[in-house]
Image (cartoon, rainbow, N blue to C red):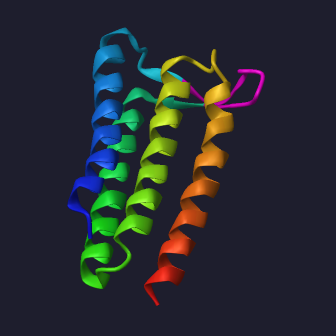
Amino acid sequence: MNKRGWIIPILIITLNVLAIFLRWGSLSEILPAHFDLDGNAGGTMPRTTLLFYPLIGAVVCLIGYLIARAKGKLGTGMIILTSGIALILFFSTLVTLTSGQYPAFMIAEPIILLTAVVSSIIGIVRSR
């Protein structure tokens, strides 16, 4: 398993934390959430919810690392899968931080998820 590959999901999670940290002071206590493609908010959430995005990404990456380490051959597929999940959380954070002004971020989420799932399946099949 290539341990340097895990730099990518760690970097994505770090960027997520940095984005939240840089905007934290200017955010209101209640943030708009669940934007449609026109940028209209369909719900709200407390500002502290943003802190769970990088935390969830870190937990997913840790689980992926432990699975890849135990199986040995799943390394690349798990790195791609965890990177995809971390990117989804990062884009979700960006959509919230920009108040839905750039809904193009939301189009990236399904594409990244599909890429991560397909890559993970390829990694699992190749490992057998």
The residue drawn where x is 61% and y is 30% is: 105
Q: Is residue 36 left or right of residue 60?
A: right
The front one of 103 and 118 is 118
The residue drawn where x is 74% and y is 30% is: 36
The front one of 28 and 77 is 77
The front one of 117 and 59 is 117
Q: Residue furthest right?
A: 38
- The quadrant where residue 80 appears: bottom left
- 21 is higher (above) or lower (below) than 42: above
| Quarter of the image where the N terminus is located | bottom left
Question: Residue 49 at what x, y percent from top left?
Answer: 41, 37
- Is 87 part of what is drawn in magenta? no
Does residue 55 appear in the picture of this structure?
no
Q: Residue furthest top?
A: 26
The residue drawn where x is 37% and y is 50% is: 57
The front one of 79 and 109 is 79
Question: Residue 55 at what x, y percent from top left?
Answer: 31, 47
The residue drawn where x is 54% and y is 64% is: 119
User: What residue span does the magenta drawing correspond to?
Assistant: 32-43
